Each structure stands twice: as structure tokens, then as C-alpha cells.
Image (tube, rainbow, N blue to C red):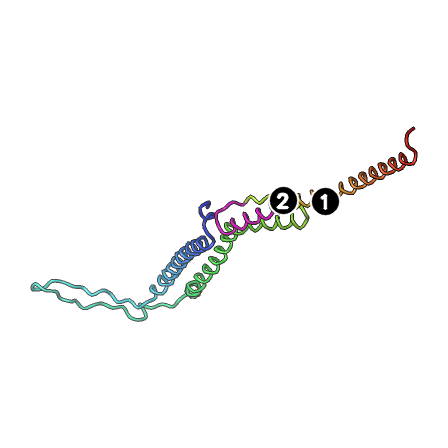
């Protein structure tokens, strides 16, 4: 199963379809053969039968003895209701069962392909999208299979990492912007105090 998960989507799909087709053909052939055998056993038991001719040697050759045959009334008998029902059912099953097995094969192949190749990566991507929609980047996608969806998950993980870096950079800029007004105000007040002191010293020089 691990090798199947690491296959590309195309190879995995073809392999699952091929295995399913073989199983469907085997089941269909076996069911048709069984139904045909049951049908033949019933119908042949009602066929007109002739006693086998007797061969014997005479003067170094074969001589065909006169065959004894049973009358038509002795060789034939009517079908019972149960036998007729079985014959009709086997005839229908020889058509219905292959169709049923084919439909079940398609469903099983699709289900198997979904659970083996699609379910895990799609679930991981869906959860990742939900986290990003909630502004939560503290997660990671751990799907590491070597197929197309694995590459997609790795690309998604790379995008998440870049978003984390960008968010950290933006938060740094915001924090710097928050500190800049305070520094500017402090410098303005310091310059104002220096100018005031200078002006006062000019007006009242020390004696």
C-alpha cells in the first residue's frame, strides 16, 4: 500500500483500474459458468435420449447392432415449476451478475483511489486553508508522499512559511512605528528645553 501511495496519480489510477477489471472479469466468468452449468443440468435431463448402439466384431470388422430406442413419451418429461423457475433465474443471472460486478468494480475502484491517493492530502489542505482563513499560521502540513499532491502540499507549506516571514516583518514595522512617535516627542521636548535654557541664559547672563 505504501508503494501505491508514492505512485503518481496516473499510475495509481491505472493500476487500481487494471486490478479491478481482472477481478470483475474473473467473478463474471465464474458466475456465468456456474449458472450455465446449473441451467444445462436441468435442460439436458429433459432431452430426448437414444440408447447407445452396440458395436461388435465380426469377420475382422465392426458390425453395428440395431439400436434400441425409447419412445418419445418415455424419453421426455415435463419441467416442474421449480425447474422452470431455476432455468429462468439462471438465464437472468448470466446477464445481471456481470453488470452488477462491473458497477461494483467501478464503485470500489473509485473508493479505493480516493482513500489511497486523495483523502489524506485533501484533508490536510482543507485544514490548512481553514487555519489561514482564521489568521492562524502556527501549523504545518505533514503530507510527504512523492506524488503530485505531495508536491502541492509542499508548495502550500512553503507559502505558509513565506506568510509567517512576511507577518513577522510587518509586525516589526508596526512596532517600530509605535516607538518612533515617542522618540520624536522626547527629542522635541529636549530641544525645546535646551532652547529655553539658552534663551534664559542670554537674558540673564551669569554674574
- Residue 50, position as x, y percentages in the image: 26, 67
* Placement of the C terminus among the 4 image quadrants: top right
Q: Is mark 2 on a helix, strand or loop?
A: helix
- Residue 83, position as x, y percentages in the image: 41, 64
Q: Which of 136 and 59 is in front in this view?
A: 136
Main SS of the magenta segment?
helix
Q: Nearer the viewer, residue 11 or 40?
A: 11
Q: Which residue is drawn at 35% across and 61% down?
A: 41
Residue at the far front in the pictured view: 207
- Residue 151, position as x, y percentages in the image: 51, 49
Q: Nearer the viewer, residue 142 or 45?
A: 142
Q: In this view, does 63 lie above or below 185?
A: below
Are the two marked residues, 2 and 1, in contact with CB atoms closer than 8 angstroms?
no
- Residue 28, position as x, y percentages in the image: 41, 59
Residue at the far top in the pictured view: 207
Q: What element carries label 1?
A: helix
The answer to whether residue 148 is seen in the rendering is yes
Say whether residue 184 is left or right of residue 80: right
Residue 64, by quadrant, is bottom left
Q: Is residue 153 magenta?
A: yes
Residue at the far left in the pictured view: 59
Q: Residue 188 carries which label?
A: none
What residue is pinned by disc 1? 174
* Residue range (magenta): 143-165
Q: Which of 2 and 24 is in front in this view?
A: 2
Residue 48, by quadrant, is bottom left
Say whether residue 164 is left or right of residue 204: left
What residue is pinned by disc 2? 165
Amino acid at each position: 500500500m505504501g508503494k501505491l501511495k508514492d505512485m503518481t496519480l496516473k499510475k495509481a489510477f491505472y493500476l487500481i483500474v487494471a486490478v479491478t477489471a481482472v477481478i470483475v472479469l474473473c467473478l463474471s466468468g465464474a458466475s456465468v459458468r456456474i449458472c450455465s452449468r446449473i441451467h444445462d443440468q436441468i435442460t439436458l435431463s429433459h432431452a430426448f435420449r437414444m440408447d447407445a448402439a452396440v458395436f461388435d466384431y465380426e469377420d475382422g470388422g465392426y458390425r453395428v447392432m440395431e439400436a434400441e430406442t425409447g419412445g418419445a413419451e418415455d424419453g421426455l418429461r415435463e419441467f416442474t415449476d421449480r425447474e422452470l423457475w431455476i432455468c429462468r433465474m439462471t438465464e437472468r443471472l448470466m446477464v445481471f451478475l456481470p453488470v452488477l460486478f462491473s458497477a461494483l468494480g467501478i464503485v470500489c475502484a473509485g473508493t479505493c483511489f480516493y482513500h489511497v491517493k486523495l483523502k489524506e492530502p485533501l484533508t490536510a489542505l482543507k485544514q490548512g486553508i481553514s487555519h489561514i482563513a482564521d489568521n492562524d499560521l502556527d501549523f504545518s502540513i505533514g503530507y510527504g508522499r512523492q506524488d503530485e499532491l505531495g508536491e502541492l502540499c509542499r508548495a502550500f507549506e512553503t507559502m505558509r512559511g513565506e506568510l509567517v516571514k512576511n507577518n513577522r516583518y510587518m509586525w516589526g514595522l508596526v512596532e517600530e512605528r509605535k516607538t518612533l512617535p515617542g522618540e520624536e516627542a522626547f527629542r522635541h521636548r529636549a530641544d525645546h528645553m535646551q532652547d529655553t535654557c539658552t534663551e534664559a541664559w542670554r537674558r540673564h547672563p551669569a554674574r
